[in-house]
Image (tube, rainbow, N blue to C red):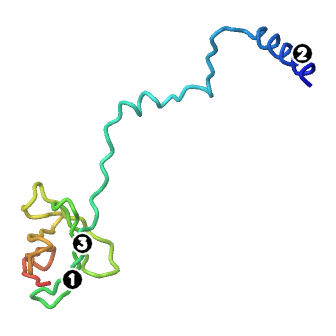
Amino acid sequence: MTRTLLPIALAAAAALAGCNQEDHTIESGPADPMANALANAAPVELPPSIAASKIYRCKDNSVVYVDWLSDKKTANFRADRAAAPTQLKAGAEGEAMTAEGYSLTGTAQAPSITLTRPGKGSQTCKA
């Protein structure tokens, strides 16, 4: 058994000695054309999440729905539960949130808000 192992080991050593000793560069595919643009891109900012959803009854006995967003400068307003929301934004936290004809003053923690909307004027709404 030792007699057969010795020739096999010598043959394996001779085969390995014949290998090319040059450095090899292996590429997995063509270079990514967007790699440079992606590396230099600004970080992605996610949109704010909904921090609170509240239902308010206004002075004119109408019901409105407000989703307060986590950035504390944005709210989604709906006059009907199934309606598409109107996004109201403020320049800074604590200022009135506005959009074309709408104005909303208040916070998610406050028991009431002041709402102005087209055709209805300004009114107080309670949660």
Please state if 17 lies on the left or on the right of 102 as rendered: right
The label on residue 7 is 2
**Disc 1: which residue:** 55
Residue at the front extreme of this rendering:
2
Residue type at tag 3: Asp
16 displayed left or right of 62: right
Q: Nearer the viewer, mark 3 or mark 2?
A: 2
Badge 3 is on which residue?
Answer: 67
Instruction: Examine the rendered structure and indicate whether residue 63 appears above or below residue 35.
Output: below
Q: List x then y, in percent, for residue 80.
A: 28, 82
Q: Which tag, 1 or 2, sits closer to the chain's start?
A: 2
Q: Residues within 10 Å of mark 1 (few under 14, many from 20)?
A: some
The residue that appears at 19% across and 59% down in the rendered structure is 71
C-alpha separation, residue under disc 3 versus residue under disc 2: 81 Å
Q: Which mark is residue 112?
A: none
Q: What's the residue type where badge 2 is placed?
A: Pro
> Pointers 3 and 2 in contact (CB under 8 A)?
no
Q: Residue furthest bottom?
A: 61
Mark 1 → mark 2, Cα distance in angstroms: 88 Å
Which class describes the residues within 10 Å of circle 2: few (<14), some (14-19), or many (20+)? few
The residue drawn where x is 79% and y is 13% is 13
- Going by the numbered disc 1, the residue's amino acid type is Ile
Question: In the image, is residue 52 above or below residue 32?
Answer: below
Residue 112 location (% of width, % of height): 8, 80
The numbered mark, 3 or 2, whose residue comes first in the sequence reads 2
What residue lies at 88% left-to-right and 21% top-to-bottom?
Answer: 5
Q: Quick check: marks 1 and 2 in contact, CB under 8 Å?
A: no
- Give the quadrant of residue 79: bottom left
Residue 124 x %, y %: 7, 81
